[in-house]
Amino acid sequence: MSRLSRMKIFPFLIVASLLTGCTDFFIQELDIPRQDVDNQLVIHGFVNDTDDSIEMVIGKNWSVDEELDEAESKINQAKISIFQSGNLKYEIEQDPQGKYLKKLSSMLGGAGEDWRIEVTHPDYDKAVVNTVMPRMVFPKSVRFIEGYNFGGVGSFEEANAIEITIDDPGDQENYYEVRLLTVVIDQEELIFGTDTFYVETYYPDNYFSDDPIIERGTSGLLIPDDSFNGKERVFYIVMTGQKVEDIPVDKLKVEWNCVSRDHYQYSKSLQKYQRSSNFGFFAEPIGIYTNVENGLGLVSFKASRILDVAE
């Protein structure tokens, strides 16, 4: 065998040896000591200013080496006290169905006011949330744009889009969240023998933005106003989906939310966590934002409206 041939084979022997070593490494069992965690209440509640009821979910945390089903993670017999601008407004206790639900006589309201939520239970430290109900800032306009070029200068990438113009108030910190509602724009009836089927066309299938300011959250597109505070700003939400020749613009709807900073941070962190979980063993640990003192979870107040789209 020539010297050159031996040089070619040698690296393969090294790689084979390394791969064998890697295999042995990954099949080893790791003896991880049990990690004790502090028992804390976990609170989740998402409340709109137009809601006529308040519902929250109260649970408990547990360590990664514990196996609990959904029923075991719930907390019973907790008490929720809700304060509006320092005054006790509502008290919620568990109902016979196990829910923490309060029916209101009218819409919640309370825009721009401070809200405090206290959750108590005899076996846990009191958990507290301080938040604010955001004021509704309506967009100046919401328009349908056909053939929007979202690829930049020199690009021929086009799609339908929603143009949203915001006249942002300069006297407050604002966070906006946008969701496009999927609507049925066509329905075809198919008959096979005695069976009837309906094939529906939905639009849009998905949506995104090419604007660097806009961030993807778990519940929609997030827009912080720190780069255009007190100024007018135009955004484009690009719609993708099935090729539709005639889109009934009057059916398109935009869910427009003015959210708190807590909601903004939570939605971003949860999105990053869900994306990182796809990498399994190699994922970088991502902490999920919480606004609960002496606990975990999120209580989010937001002002929300469903808006029509103009042509």
Image: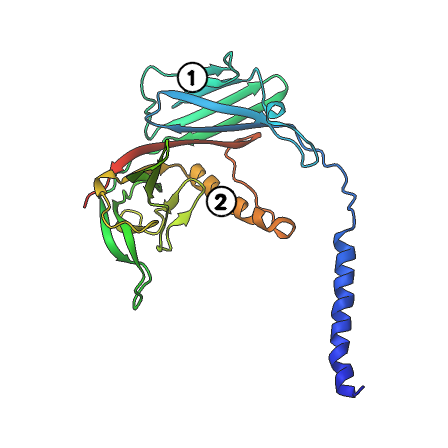
Q: Which image quadrant for residue 47?
A: top left
Q: Which mark is residue 102?
A: 1
Residue extending farthest bottom: 2
Query: Which residue shows up at 55% across the image and 17% down it?
Result: 78
Residue extending farthest front: 193
Q: Earlier in the sequence, mark 1 or mark 2?
A: 1
Q: Amino acid at mark 2?
A: Gln
Secondary structure at badge 1 equals strand
Query: Which residue shows up at 29% across the image and 34% down it?
Result: 306
* In the foreground, 295 or 190: 190
**Which image quarter holds the N terminus?**
bottom right
**How far across and down, in percent of the image, does residue 121 sit?**
58, 18
**How far across and down, in percent of the image, does residue 166 sit?**
26, 45
* In the foreground, 144 or 49: 144
Q: Which mark is residue 271?
A: 2
The answer, for residue 182, to whether it is visible in the render is no
Secondary structure at badge 2 equals helix
